[in-house]
Image (tube, helix red, strand yellow):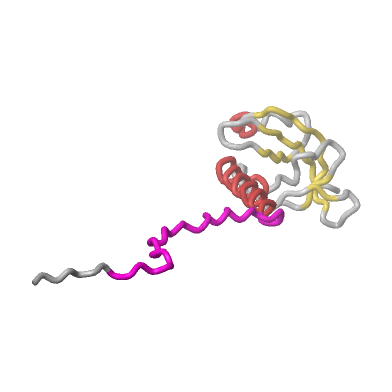
Amino acid sequence: MSEQVAPPPASDAATPQPAVATPPPAPSEAKKSGAKKALGIIGTILVIVVIAGLKFGIGSFLNKDETADAKAGDCIAELPEITGTEQEKVSGAKVVECTSTDAAYNVVGRVEDQTEAQAKADTACNQFFKYIFSSIAPGKTGYVLCLTKKA
């Protein structure tokens, strides 16, 4: 005899389908706060200023020429003693009040657009019994101050 196998009884509940995993929503990029944006802008500006300072010479800001605006009638503080007749480089020259005890020279003239060679030729101030002080970058032009020793 043959046996017949009965199918399993049907259950009332539907067989569960495999669940399809849905990816969670991508987190939205957090918006920068106003303070962070401002810091970013300030940082960018600071970087640009530093690069420009390095490229164009930050030294010109740090080593300000304190005699750049000197004119006839002004006074200059004592300069280092120069021995002989050769011109020498000096630093620290500055305009001071003529009533100051630091005033050592009177500015009696100013000549603009002089080259180093012209300043070294010492002819710009020939009309004065003088000392000269010049501020001229190599290869450029600058000014010569004609000075007399303050009495």
Quarter of the figure with the N terminus: bottom left
Residue 82 appears in the figure: no
- How many numbered circles are shown? 0
Q: Residue at x 83, y 47 (%)?
A: 150
- The kind of secondary structure the magenta stretch mainly shows is loop
Front residue of this view, candidates 42 and 64: 42
Region in magenta: 8-36
Q: Residue at x 84, y 36 (%)?
A: 72
Front residue of this view, candidates 1 and 89: 1
Q: Is residue 77 left or right of residue 98?
A: left
Q: Residue furthest front?
A: 1
Q: Position of residue 110 (x, y in %)?
A: 77, 33
Q: Position of residue 78 (x, y in %)?
A: 76, 53
Residue 30 is covered by the magenta coloring: yes
Q: Is residue 67 above or below residue 111?
A: below
Q: Is residue 5 above or below residue 88?
A: below
Classify residue 68 by image quadrant.
Answer: top right
Classify residue 33 by image quadrant.
Answer: bottom right
Q: Residue at x 85, y 42 (%)?
A: 74
Q: Position of residue 137 (x, y in %)?
A: 61, 37
Q: Position of residue 62 (x, y in %)?
A: 66, 51
Q: Residue furthest left?
A: 1
Residue 112 is covered by the magenta coloring: no
Front residue of this view, candidates 139 and 124: 139
